Each structure stands twice: as structure tokens, then as C-alpha cells.
Image: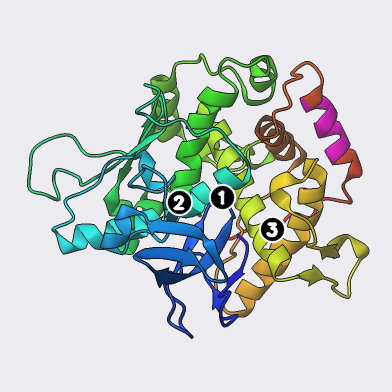
Amino acid sequence: MKIFQCQACEQPFHFETARCASCERRAGYDPDLEEVVTLTAADGTLRAFGEPGRRYRLCANAAHAACNWLIPADSPEVYCVACRHNRTVPDLSIPWNLTRWRAIETAKRRLFYSLLRMRLPLALRRDDPEGLAFDFLVDPAEAQMSGPAVLTGHDNGLITVNIAEADDVERERRRTLFGEPYRTLLGHFRHEIGHYFWNVLVRHDPSLAAFRAIFGDERADYGAALRRYYAEGPGQAWQEHFVSAYATAHPWEDFAETWAHYLHIVDTLETASSFGLRMQPKLRPGLAATMDFDPHHAPDLGRLIEAWLPLTFAMNSLNRSMGQPDLYPFRLTPAVIGKLSFVHDRIHARTDASGTVAGTLKAVIAGLRTPIAPPRSA
């Protein structure tokens, strides 16, 4: 994520800023400019500060304090490019639903920031029966109604999210129940969108053969695979080949977990780059790194990994200094890097499945210094 500032007074902005804390001017995110824009009101319209020719309207969800994205004033759309994909939202007359939905929308917009920066295709459900859409639902038991529990998941472009995931206490309970070291709203979105993009970028693509060689055959019975995972767990030494325990359940889940991890890496590296971070510890050279590039458009995965490994070692060290668990409780082995390489190639539309993925993996591993495994939680 980039960092932003007010064009009027240079106050730093967070991505979610809707009004400048210093000069109190309204602000909003313009996805075309990829900037949080300072706004002025004139003649009944919102204009970009210093650029009166650039006119906007607020996304309709701004009325619920749930979105700060902007729409061109001459657009026929009511919702912004992110909120346009919502199919169902909870009953917002219930305050607790509204609070949780706002948190969900915050995470979803961060997801869309990355997807738009990467120029990934985002078909609307209204135009394509398998286009991307979101249902944000309340569990029937919570509403004292009968019916099956709401499960967060993906089905042919439709992503369903149980809004209880926005409750920190409930999410922590589920994190402990399922033995997940890393369970966040944004992580859920990045995982589920991975399933969507498997359909879009792999399912009917020549790279499908390479996918099966790297991740396994997705034609294996999915339901049986999940039952086996929940009954038996991930198996021994899974960390050598998978980015998470859940990734061992089925090739689809492996791809989705790897996809989410790739987005974690890219977004965090962009934040580090925006702050001009450099790693220059008084240790061996392999821990040095400079964040001075745009990870969304890096031509090869090796550049990302060489910056990522020292950064995560530093982040974990800082957390431990504060008595906190590791911020990054994962290991990137050559096998996992190979899977990340496949995702990188799909995002950058490299379709030569016969050689590109294998060649990229070989180049990535050969170009790396000795891999650094970030410290893991006990």
C-alpha cells in the first residue's frame, strides 16, 4: 500500500481517509489515479483540489461511512468500482451489523486496491454469470432463525463472507479452533479471490498442465480431500512444500493460500518501499535489502523474494522486542517459492506453460542468496 497526503496541507493520509485531520477538507480514493484525492465543493459538485476540471461523486456507501472511494461525476454508476461487486449486505438498520460490515468493506477495498494496481480482470456479475460478486451474510443462528450456518467461501465467482469474521473475538476463537496462525479479514478476501482467479487465469489456460505439475491434480475429490484434512491434519513435514497447513487440503486450497500469500508480500513490500525502508544490519550481506521498486509490476519474483526475506526477519525481530508473537510465522522454501512463481506468472499473463514457470522457478532459486527462514512461533 502506498502512503498518501493531503494536496492542500500535506497532512499524511491513510488509505481509508475520508476527511483530512488537519485542514478538515473531504478526501476520497480515486482508483484511476491510484491516489487519495483532496476535495473541494463547488457548484454542487466535488472537485479535486487544484484541479477543478476533475469532478467526482461519492460512492453511495459513503452514506453509511463504509466507503471513501470516488466516482467520476459524469459516470452513470451509483457505487464505486469496488462496491459495485456487492450482491448482498446485511441489515444495516442493526448497529452491530453496520459496524462489522464497515470493517469488512475496509478489508475488501484494500483487496481491490491490489487487484486494480495489478490490472487484473474483474467481471461484474450483472455482465457475466460467473463474474465476481460478494454476499456478506449474518449466520441464521445469530439472528435466531433456522437454516444452515453461513460458511465463508467461493462458488463460481460468488464469494460469501460470514460477517462474524469481522468480530475480533469470534475470529480469534475460530483461529484457535482451526489451528491457524494467521487469520484476518483481509487474509480471507485474498484467499477467496484466489479461487476466483484460478477460474479466470488457470482453469481454461494452457498453464493448467504446469499447475497440476506444481500444485497437484485439482480433479481429486474436493469434499473427500477436506474431510481427510480435518480428520488427519496436514501430515508430517508439510512446511517444506506448502505455505500453510490448510494448503495441504487440496490443490485448489494450495493455490488460493499461495495467491493470498503473494498479495501479502506485494502489498507489504509496497508499504515498505513507500516509507523508504532499507535493511542494513551488522550481519552477513544476505540480510541487506533496499525497498526501492514497485512490487506490483516487478518483472520477476526473485526481486520480491530478495527484499521480502530480510524484511520479514526484521519485522519478527521487532515484534519479539515488544513481547509479541512473530508477525510473519511462515517459511518460504524452494517448493513454496516455486508456487509463488506460478502465481506471479499468472498475474503477469505469462502463458507459456511448457517452459516459463519452470524457467522462472530455476532463475529465482539460482538468483537468491542463501534463503533466510523467518523465525517461527513455537
- Please tell me whether mark 3 or mark 2 is closer to you in this view: 2
Residue at x 43% of width, y 57% of height? 56
Residue 12: percent from left, percent from top: 57, 77
- Disc ID at residue 72: 2
- Disc ID at residue 82: none
Residue at x 63% of width, y 26% of height? 215
Residue holding disc 3: 269
State the separation of the CA atoms marked 1 and 2.
10 Å
Residue 295: percent from left, percent from top: 72, 51
Residue positioned most to the bottom: 22
Crowd class of label 2 (few under 14; some 14 to 19; many from 20; radius 10 Å): some
Residue positioned most to the front: 43
Numbered range of the magenta stretch: 357-364
Q: Quadrant of residue 329?
A: bottom right
- Disc ID at residue 32: 1
Query: Which part of the image, by quadrant, shows the C terminus?
Result: bottom right
Residue 334: percent from left, percent from top: 77, 39
Horizontally, residue 316 falls left or right of residue 27, namely: right
Tell me, yes or no, if residue 368 can be seen here: yes
Residues under numbered marks 1 and 2 in contact, where contact means CB atoms less than 8 Å apart: yes
Describe the element under mark 2 as helix, strand or loop: strand
- At label 2, the amino acid type is Pro
Horizontally, residue 84 falls left or right of residue 342, namely: left
| Magenta run includes residue 254 | no
- At label 3, the amino acid type is Leu
Describe the element under mark 1 as helix, strand or loop: loop
